[in-house]
C-alpha cells in the first residue's frame, strides 16, 4: 500500500504514535509518506523522523487554531497529494491534521482514516457553544469524508458515540510500545541518574508531557511544593515543552524549588523514565496517552487523574492509583506521599506494571492498524 500520514501536533504521544506506526508499516513493505507541521514539532520528534529510512517527509506549516492559514496549508497538502499520489490510504492524526488530510484527499481514490488522539470535545473546559461547534465539524467530516476512525481507548470510543460519530466507522486500537528488557532499564537508570546527579536510592517522581492546558503541568509543581517538606530526599523531574514553559519555570523559582525540580525540554521521556521511581500524570483530559504505556514498559508505579486511558493502564491499588480529575490535589498528594513512605508497596506496584506492560505491544498496534487499512479498500 501507498500510505500518507498527516499530522499537525508533532510531539508527545501523537507524534510518537505516528513515528512507530510509520516505521512498522514501512517494515511491512508499504510505501510511506509523512506530511508534518514544523510549528509544534519537538526536537525529539524531528530527530526520530530524520532516522526513518525509506520514508518521504514533507513539512507543511499548520496552525492549531482555526484561521485563514488553514487555506494555505490545505492547498499545499492537496498539491502534495496530487503530485505524489495516488495514495491508497490518507491517515490524518490529531484534530487539525485529521481535518486537513480528509479535506485535501477529498473523495478521490484514497481511503481516509482519522485518529483524533483525544477528540477536542473531550476538553472539560470547552464552552457549550464551542463543544457544539467542534462536535458538528467532527460529525460532518466523519459522515462525508472518512472511511474509518481509529480511537485509542474505550473512553474515547464512548465519547465519540456520545458525540454522534458513526459507530460503523469506528474501531478501537490501543497504543503499544516496544518491549524493554531488565538490562536496558537498569543501564538507562544508572546513566540518567548519573547525568542528573541523583543518588541511586533517591526517590524520583516524573512528569512527561506537553506543557499546555490539557496536560496541566502546573499541577505537578503544586504537588512538588506540597510533598517536598515531607520527603526531603525526593526529586521531581519534568520532561516537555509548550506554551506553559515560561509559567512552569517561573513557578519553580517563585516556590523556591530550583534544587528539587528539574525541567528538561527536547529530551526523550522514554529515555528518562527508567530513572524514575514513580510516574505522575496530571492531565485534565486524555484519550490513551503514550506516557502511561511507556511508564508500564519502564515498570513504574503510576498515579494519574481519572482521564481517558488511565483505567486501561492502571489497576487501582495494584500498580498505581487513579484519583478524580480536579484542581484540588489533596488526594493525589496523599496517595503519592503514602506510596513514597511504603517501599514494599512500591516494589509490588512496580512488579504489577511490568506484568501489565505485556498487554501493550507496538507490533500488535501496527498489525491491527494495517488490518484496518486493508478492510477499507
Image: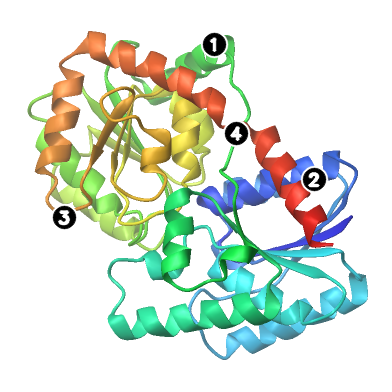
Viewer-closest of 251 and 13: 13
Give the x, y percent position of residue 318: 31, 22
Give the distance between the C-alpha atoms of the residues marked 1 and 2, in whole angstroms.
28 Å
Q: Earlier in the sequence, mark 4 or mark 2?
A: 2
Q: Earlier in the sequence, mark 1 or mark 2?
A: 2
Give the distance between the C-alpha atoms of the residues marked 4 and 2, in whole angstroms.
15 Å
Give the x, y percent position of residue 153: 49, 49
Residue where numbered disc 3 is placed? 327
Q: Which mark is residue 216?
A: none
Query: Which of the image's four quarters has the C terminus?
Result: bottom right
Determine the image quadrant of residue 115: bottom right
Residue where numbered disc 2 is placed? 25
Apparent side of residue 155 relative to residue 169 in the rendered image (left or right): left
Residue where numbered disc 1 is placed? 182
Q: Which mark is residue 177?
A: 4
Q: Secondary structure at mark 1?
A: helix
Answer whether labels 4 and 1 touch (C-beta < 8 Å). Answer: no
Q: Secondary structure at mark 4?
A: loop
Determine the image quadrant of residue 236: top left
Q: Earlier in the sequence, mark 4 or mark 1?
A: 4
Res. 80 in view: yes
Q: Secondary structure at mark 2?
A: helix
Give the distance between the C-alpha atoms of the residues marked 4 and 1, in whole angstroms.
15 Å
Viewer-closest of 369 and 218: 369
Q: Is residue 22 above or below residue 170?
A: above
Of marks 1 and 2, the one in the foreground: 2
Residue located at (77% from left, 77% from top) = 105
Determine the image quadrant of residue 121: bottom left
Amino acid at each position: 500500500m501507498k500510505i500518507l500520514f498527516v499530522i499537525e501536533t508533532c510531539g508527545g504521544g501523537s507524534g510518537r504514535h505516528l513515528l512507530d506506526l510509520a516505521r512498522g508499516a514501512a517494515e511491512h513493505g508499504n510505501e510511506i509518506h509523512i506530511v508534518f507541521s514544523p510549528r509544534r514539532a519537538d526536537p525529539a520528534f524531528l530527530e526520530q523522523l530524520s532516522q526513518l529510512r525509506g520514508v518521504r517527509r514533507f513539512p507543511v506549516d499548520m496552525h492549531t487554531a482555526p484561521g485563514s492559514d488553514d487555506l494555505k496549508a490545505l492547498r499545499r497538502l492537496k498539491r502534495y497529494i496530487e503530485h505524489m499520489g495516488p495514495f491508497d490510504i490518507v491517515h490524518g492524526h490529531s484534530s487539525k491534521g485529521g481535518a486537513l488530510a480528509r479535506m485535501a484527499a477529498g473523495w478521490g481514490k484514497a481511503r481516509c482514516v482519522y485518529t483524533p488522539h483525544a477528540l477536542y470535545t473531550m476538553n472539560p473546559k470547552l464552552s457549550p457553544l464551542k463543544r457544539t461547534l467542534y462536535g458538528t465539524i467532527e460529525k460532518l467530516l466523519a459522515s462525508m469524508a472518512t472511511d474509518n476512525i481509529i480511537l485509542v481507548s474505550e473512553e474515547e470510543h464512548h465519547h465519540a458515540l456520545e458525540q454522534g460519530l458513526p459507530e460503523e466507522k469506528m474501531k478501537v486500537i490501543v497504543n503499544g510500545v516496544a518491549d524493554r528488557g531488565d538490562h536496558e532499564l537498569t543501564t538507562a537508570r544508572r546513566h540518567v541518574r548519573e547525568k542528573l546527579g541523583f543518588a541511586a536510592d533517591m526517590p524520583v517522581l516524573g512528569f512527561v508531557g506537553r506543557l499546555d492546558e490539557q496536560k496541566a503541568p502546573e499541577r505537578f509543581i503544586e504537588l512538588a511544593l506540597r510533598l517536598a517538606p515531607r520527603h526531603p530526599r525526593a526529586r521531581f523531574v519534568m520532561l516537555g515543552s509548550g506554551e506553559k514553559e515560561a509559567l512552569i519555570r517561573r513557578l519553580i523559582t517563585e516556590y523556591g524549588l530550583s534544587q528539587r525540580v528539574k525541567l528538561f525540554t527536547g529530551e526523550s521521556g522514554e529515555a528518562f523514565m527508567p530513572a524514575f521511581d514513580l510516574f505522575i500524570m496530571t492531565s485534565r483530559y486524555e484519550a490513551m496517552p503514550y506516557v502511561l504505556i511507556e511508564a508500564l514498559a519502564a515498570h513504574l508505579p503510576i498515579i494519574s487523574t481519572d482521564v481517558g486511558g488511565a483505567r486501561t493502564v492502571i489497576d487501582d491499588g495494584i500498580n498505581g492509583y487513579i484519583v478524580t480529575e480536579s484542581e484540588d490535589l489533596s488526594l493525589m498528594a496523599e496517595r503519592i506521599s503514602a506510596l513514597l513512605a511504603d517501599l514494599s508497596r512500591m516494589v509490588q506496584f512496580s512488579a504489577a506494571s511490568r506484568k501489565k506492560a505485556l498487554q501493550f505491544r507496538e507490533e500488535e498496534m501496527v498489525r491491527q492498524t494495517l488490518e484496518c487499512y486493508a478492510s477499507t479498500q
